[in-house]
Image (tube, coloured by chain):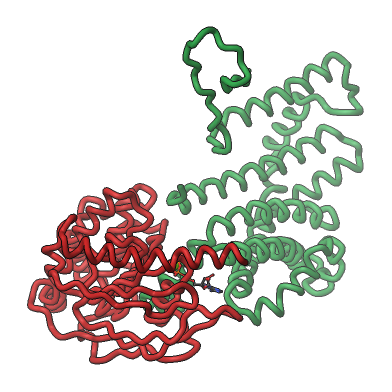
Chain colours: A green, B red
Amino acid sequence: MADTGAGKKRDGDGPIEVRFRGGGFAPRSLRWVGVAVFVVLIAMVQWGTESGWISALTLPKPTDVLATFRELWESGLLFKHLQPSLTRLVIGAALGASTGIAIGVLIGLFSYARAGLVPLVAAIFPIPKIALLPLFVIWFGIDEGSKYALIAFGTFTPTVVATYGAVDNVDRSLIRMGQSFGLSWSSIVRKIVLPGAMPGILSGLRISLAIAIILLVAAEMLGAEYGIGAYILEAGSLYDLERLFAGVVILSLLGVLVSALIGFLEKRLLGWRI
Amino acid sequence: MAAVSSHAGMLSGSYRVGMDIKLDGISHHYGHTEVLRNISLDIPAGQIVCLVGPSGCGKSTLLRLIGGLERPGNGRVLQVGAPPADSLNPLTFVFQDFALLPWRSVKGNVSLVLEDHGIRGKRSKAIIDDVLNRTKLADFADALPKQLSGGMKQRVAIARALAVNPAVMLMDEPLSALDAQTRELLMDDLVALWTRQPFTAVYVTHNLAEAVRLGHTIVVLSRRPGRIREIISIDTPISERRAGDPVCQRKHDLLWELMREEARAADEELIDG
Ligand SMILES: Nc1ncnc2c1ncn2[C@@H]1O[C@H](COP(=O)(O)OP(=O)(O)OP(=O)(O)O)[C@@H](O)[C@H]1O
Ligand SMILES: [Mg+2]
């Protein structure tokens, strides 16, 4: 009922309570809602596959996926695949994100860096990095080197763009304040620009790290003995849906983990935000 | 403790002859807009000079020129005499929007301006305690800016300015973001601070009550391009000025007349495009 009073018929002269219209636009943390969405979806699939409403060729039974997953765990195969994948992800993403933040800050601070590098970044951003894998194989070797490079390169571009945007958004009046108190250039960068850009950098990292996971799988599909990507590729080529889905679940969990990690960092570093 | 006592000595001891500021034929343009025209003015040490004028007449610009945040198109800003030896930042701003770092506590915001001068540890703590006491913020040393009211934030900004022992404070509408009561209280605070230890200040405001309360001299600027329209001085010591004081009231009315003409003319210019 939208009753501002004007549109509603009045019963005599009785006072009308003012309609509340100030809600929303203030996200709260409601963790259980996310869990509930997952539970409902999975329960629906389980019910569908059991009743035959969803055919076995369309989707595997969630319980079967879980059983596959347990098998994977018990045989120790899970860690055999997870360990190289995580190493690749951590090394590649750390390389890409740290150079991305450094270059992004340079672009944010120096006109020449901006003039020279922004078009370059714009030119390499849309290239599907996976297309360059053969090149990386030649440059960095067939094994780990090319995978690190691919992930690093893929994380690098979105991080650069997010970082220089974040630096641009740092309140100029705070920088002016720093200058007016005679702070050195490096103090202004360390104590004003970087903390001020941190919210933008972290939200950029959310995207970059998701891209890193995608590229990790792509790289492993193109050539790796062990790794989640290799596992999924093998399952897919055998049309083994249970194992395929078990692999996909691992990826999703990885995504949730990364997102939670960033959420934790935001809580720690950005507690000052209103 | 030597440095601390010299700092404290500066606060409570007798006032020494400080640094005057002299504006010599300042003009300034932004693109094709002439903002300031031929401003010459003396700002004597130990006095508060208030700048009033219609909106957009270039008051903030003039203050930035004085503080060295921008270069004047023409003319020069001169320091006459040396700033006190223990002044860390002779020309110090207090901004209208406070300009506090939201990620640092009250203490951290003050220590920010000391760190670059190599003041850390005990010395830093002594200075911070002193300025927070003087601005009545001692209980809020660890609070973040988001937890403070507007008046408290501006007191933090004033504490931060006091910490570097300025020779001249450049204040750009420091109280205009605050409500009337808080403004009154902070004006009392400023008067008390000045009485305890006279400082030099250029105080930009569009509030005439603030100007007659705090200014030894009040400089009225014309509408853009800003020129000096009138310089009014008030001889009543600022600690003795009260609301409704006849001398102050007369000055206030005089200022109001001057300002009204300028404001009206400025308004009509805008309507004409
Ligand atoms: N960085 C800038 N670039 C271009 N124009 C500017 C700049 N800063 C100020 N101006 C213009 O210069 C004129 C004077 O601005 P200024 O901020 O100094 O006025 P002011 O007297 O402080 O006004 P107010 O009372 O509104 O604070 C205005 O017309 C403004 O639009
Ligand atoms: Mg202004």
Residue situated in front as seen by the camera: B268 or B73 = B268
Q: Residue at x 64, y 51 (%)?
A: A206
Is A44 situated above or below A165?
A: above
Report which quarter residue B26 is drawn in: bottom left
Left or right relative to B221: residue A159: right
Camera-nearest residue between A117 and A226:
A117
Classify A51 as above or below A67: above
Say which of A97 and B56 sits in front. B56
* Residue displayed at 27% across by 82% down: B43
Picture residue at 87% right of the left edge, 35% below the top: A240
Q: Quadrant of the N terminus of chain A?
A: top right
Task: From this view, report whether residue A109 is shown above or below residue A93.
Answer: below
Relative to B270, B151 lies left or right: left
- Please state if A19 lies on the left or on the right of A235 as rendered: left
Residue found 50% across the figure and 16% down from its top: A16
Question: Quick check: A68 left or right of B111?
Answer: right
